[in-house]
Image: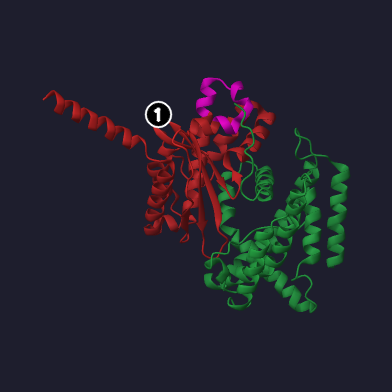
Amino acid sequence: MKRLFAMLAGLLVTAGAVAQEIAPDTLVRNVSNDVLEIVRKDKDIQSGNTRKAVELADAKVLPHFNFAHMTKLAVGKDWRQANPAQQKILIDEFRSLLVRTYSKALTEYRNQTIDFKPLKMQPADTDVIVRTLVNQPGSKPVQIDYNLEKTDQGWKVYDIIVGGISLVTNYRGSFAQEISAGGIDGLIATLRTKNKSGDVPVAQKQ
Amino acid sequence: MRQLLKRAVLTLAMAALLGGCATTTNKDPLEGFNRTVFAFNEGLDTVLIRPAAKGYETILPSMARTGVINFFGNVADVFIAVNNLLQGKPADAVGDAARFIFNSTFGIFGIFDVASEMGLEKHEEDFGQTFGRWGVGPGAYVVVPVFGPRDVRDTVGLVVDLTVDPVGNVGHVPTRNTLTALRMASDRAALLPADKIIEEAALDKYSYLRDAYLQRRRNLVYDGRPPREPDTD
């Protein structure tokens, strides 16, 4: 009886561990294919329904991002100037900005397909780059790479590199400009205004 | 007209070189000048180039637009091969030459990109990247009238690109103008989806595009594997 119990416990632990241990390239592949499948069938999103695109992004994509780390990287050396309350606001506002931008990109879907490059990683790696190539009919293919780090909740994305352009590094320039013009509060104000403008609804905060 | 344009671009590069040196603390010493030219380019885009691209997109179906991209891509492969050779990448250069031969023949003057389907990867090289490979640093960021974002090195590279450009060297002027306009419309149309996304993403369009440009050039010089810049922690 005890042995049976121990075996069951062992199985449960393994199952739990396996669920957490989805390899980063498998994760990127599954999520990308999931999202594309949904957008491919959803004419609403393709014709510009950004609210639905935001819901899709929220449900499928955002859980796999480490926004705290991304915001910290984008703000850069001035992150320490911000107090915890400001830091929280920055994370929320940057997250909204990224969700809205990503959702807008989804509405521009026009039959793209993705090639997933093979991932070379060591079992002990905690920081990897997953490389993909997005093919677009009528346009040149675009290289999209994901920087993922291993966390307690599984692999999380902390940077996306589109055509050699790192999201985090690009925003670092913009954020530095805003901070030197108006400090941390100036940056927060600009982000808030930006998120309120435009036709894309602000994502639900979790 | 072309001579004038080339001379203007070269003068601009010289002025940028003398007028501003990019340091690690200031990658955009010519920002005032650049923002002015940027505003001019945006105006030109709104009034002339973007409407032409939208019209082009409306008139030509997707397959035909792919054909146009392939045609000009094929023309470009000749000097992509030259640049790969100059950068000490003979294997890539041979691939580019093979692409040109296959696409021009089986691909019917380059309209069909059969070479990619055969596994011959398309590269992206220009003289700016060649200079970068040779160790020339990028220099200050420059916004060139009409052509848009460059750095000093790539502005000089642009002059060389323009000089050797096969389309630009077509003898028959009306044909040359038609081809140039077609290529411009095709290139701009391919970027139309990006417009909306940049609208959404950018806090300040000028600095967003500048940072994106500088990053992308670095990436291209290193052929997709640039050393990662240190993250401040």
Compared across the picture, whether A38 is left or right of B143 comes to left
Q: Does the segment drawn in magenta span residue B4?
A: no
Type of secondary structure dominating the magenta stretch? helix
Colour for chain A in the figure: red
Q: Is residue A75 magenta?
A: yes
Viewer-nearest residue: B17 or B148: B17
Where residue B174 appears, x then y in whole percent?
76, 78
Can residue A39 be seen by looking at this rendering?
A: yes
Q: Which residues are magenta?
A: A72-89
Q: Where is residue B164 drawn, in percent x and y? A: 79, 66
Percent coordinates x, y for residue B136 in the rendering: 79, 46
User: Type of residue at label 1?
Assistant: Asp
Relative to A85, say whether B25 is above or below: below
Element type at mark 1: loop
Q: Residue at x 65, y 30 (%)?
A: A179
Quarter of the figure that contains the C terminus of chain A? top left
Tell me if I can see residue B51 in this picture: no
Q: Quadrant of residue B181?
A: bottom right
Q: Decide which of B52, B90 is in the foreground and name it.
A: B90
Shown in green, the chain is B
> How far across and how far down the image is residue B163, in percent?
81, 65
Query: From the viewer's perspective, is residue B175 above or below residue B20?
Result: below
Residue A183 falls in which quadrant of the image?
top right
Q: Which residue is mark 1?
A: A152
Q: Quadrant of residue B206?
A: top right
Task: Look at the picture and state if B147 lies above or below A102.
Answer: below
Q: Residues within 10 Å of mark 1 (few under 14, many from 20)?
A: few
* Residue beneath the point at 62% across and 35% down: A172
Q: Camera-side residue: A16 or B145?
A: A16
Specify the subunit that label 1 lies on.
A
